[in-house]
Amino acid sequence: MGRPVILLMLAEILVNGLVLTGVYAMLALGFSLVFGVGRVLNLAHTAFFMLASYGIFYFVGQETGMALAVLASAGVVVVVGLVLYKLFIEPVRDMEATVLIAALATAVLLQELMLLYFGDRYLFVPAAFPGYTRILGVRVGNQEIATLGLAVLSLVGTWLLLARTRLGLAIRAAAQDREVANLMGINVGRVTAMVMALGLLLAALAGAAVAPLRTVGPHMWMHPLVIVLAAVVLGGLGSLKGSLIGAVVLAFAEVIMVVAVPGGAFLRTAVALAIMLGVFLLRPHGLFGSGVAEEG
């Protein structure tokens, strides 16, 4: 393999890794926020990512335009997610095992509803930004660049919300100690609902960003769920910084596997599971053991 080919492969890994990092970071950040404040391992998190992708397909089909489709899909996901949270998860929030079952049942419910309405087939969403741009000699789709841009805006916006607003202060206080936050006059129940809405919004934006890049199908939430779990385990459960670093590691590991290993696309989930198991064995608390409150 010549040097130009190796350099081109490295450039492809870098560019595609950054795009995939953006998607995984949005999902992992939302998952960690919900756990950090609500103490809920929301296994249905990536099912709302799937729901948003279906929403993009539906609304684009109604000729609303991509911008309106993203807004409409995000709104539907947040509303549906909050209703399902109130119905199925909040009543059993203090029972950890039951929460896991309720969240997984919610994910399967959404999957079956999508199967019922759209059928067991793969759907395609046309790119809002057709064409491509050459970056470091690699042809990168304009839609992928837009996806990375949306991810950066979402992550920066979330950081500003947590670090520069009163709501962010309340979120960090609730994450540190719910009882003390209540005594300070913070409505912890309302803050938890707002964090759930923020997590749902991040999942919806990730789903909207991915829809034009991949086929939309009823099982598309399963692989991202493994990635999210691996990312938060690697970074440290409840650590926002750790989740973002975990997302970077998992995204680049997946891209390297797909680009550099023949047939690597079939092993991408196995790589995430191997990393997660390795962390469990070598560093059970992850790279960063801190919580949301310590990272604002």
Image: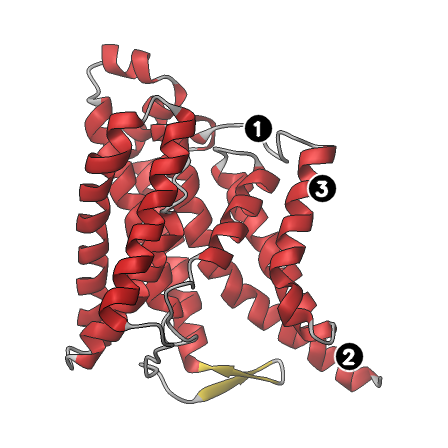
Task: From the image, tell me which residue sits under label 2.
Answer: 6
**Mark 3: which secondary structure?**
helix
Residue designated by label 1: 289
Query: Which SS class for mark 2?
Result: helix
The quarter holding residue 126 reads bottom left
- Quote the CA–CA distance across marks 3 and 1: 17 Å
Residue type at mark 1 is: Gly
- Labels 2 & 3 near each other (Cβ < 8 A): no
Are there few (<14), some (14-19), or many (20+) residues within 10 Å of tag 3?
A: few
What secondary structure is found at the residue carrying circle 1? loop
Left or right of 184? Residue 152 is right
In the rendered structure, are the residues bearing label 3 and label 1 in contact, judged by CB atoms less than 8 Å apart? no
Q: Residues within 10 Å of mark 2 (few under 14, many from 20)?
A: few
Residue 230 at x, y percent in the picture: 57, 46
The three-letter code of the residue at mark 3 reads: Gly
For disc 3, the marked residue is 278
> From mark 2 to mark 3, how far is it between C-alphas?
29 Å
* Residue shown at the point (46%, 47%) measured from the top left: 28
Q: Give the quarter of the image for residue 177.
A: top left
> Left or right of 56: which side holds 103?
right
Image quarter of residue 181 = top left
Mark 2 vs mark 1, CA separation in Å: 37 Å
Position in image of residue 290 (x %, y %): 53, 27
